[in-house]
Amino acid sequence: MSVTAPQTMSLVSHDQNLTPKQKTEDLMLELIENFGKDEVEEAVKYLHYRNPTPLPKNEKKGKPILYVFRHGETSDNFNMLFSGWRDVNITEKGKKQALALANKLAKKDIDMLICSDQIRSIETMKLAMSKNTKGKNLEIIKEPRIKERRYGDWEGQSKLKMLLTHPESKEQRRDFDFVPPNGESMAMVEGRVLAFLREILPLMRKHNVNVALSCHGNSIRAIRKKYEGLTNEQAAHIETILGEDYAAYYVG
């Protein structure tokens, strides 16, 4: 597929004192003026549409099990911004999502905690383990290879504005091999995630341990592709719920 990446764009207001929410509200007014209310509302519906693919739980065979979950909601998620390698905290809603996950993981026998080196992943892991007697006392290992896809020049930009001004970005975002300017494709993310798995899986089998993995929407795609037998196209289009649930893969 031959595509041209749209150039970067700024939010309507350059006032650094505005909050992300205020910037988003200003941007909405500008876009409604330029594109009309109906078109903007349709674009918002598309970006907010969520049809999460059910997360498999293959726990019956016992250890070793890889527990995988996505971080809770962040302000970038709420404001429809490309996060990538930006370091943003989870919101109050994100904390509630992680605590709902904590209830589901409370009685799991977890021996090792691994998350990306991004704060949203770390915060989610701490809350997700807060009700697990063993897990809440384990050291959290930070692994950069499972961090989010790097969106390069798109990071911090509005998904809504890009969708309206560059309609081709809708297709580009779900092209497994598309590389945003100075960023990564999903295929590139898959490469580093699989390299990590090639190291951790033999250790899990050797020592018979369960591992909890807190990561991101795109790094999870690579894991789900491997264990759920997905094609590139399927992996590019699956949605993993924010924070609230987990996948469990038997890796023995």
Image (tube, helix red, strand yellow):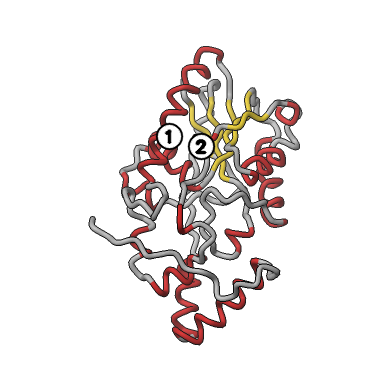
Location of residue 215 by image quarter = top right
- The one nearer the camera, 149 or 206, is 149
**Residue 250: image x %, image y %?**
48, 27
Q: Amino acid at mark 2?
A: Ile
Q: Is residue 252 left or right of residue 215?
A: left
Q: Secondary structure at mark 2?
A: helix
Residue at left 56%, top 13%? 207
Q: Amino acid at mark 1?
A: Arg
Q: Is residue 220 left or right of residue 229?
A: right
Residue at the left extreme, as displayed: 1
- The one nearer the camera, 17 or 200, is 17
Disc number placed over residue 230 in the picture, else none? none
Q: Is residue 199 above or below residue 149?
A: above
Disc number placed over residue 146 in the picture, else none? 2
Residue at left 44%, top 68%? 162
**Residue 21: image x %, image y %?**
65, 69
Residue at left 47%, top 17%? 202
Q: Secondary structure at mark 1?
A: helix
Q: Which residue is labeled 1 in the image?
A: 192
Q: Sequence order check: which comes first, mark 1 or mark 2?
A: 2
Q: Is residue 132 left or right of residue 120?
A: right
**Residue 28: image x %, image y %?**
55, 78
- The one nearer the camera, 83 or 224, is 83
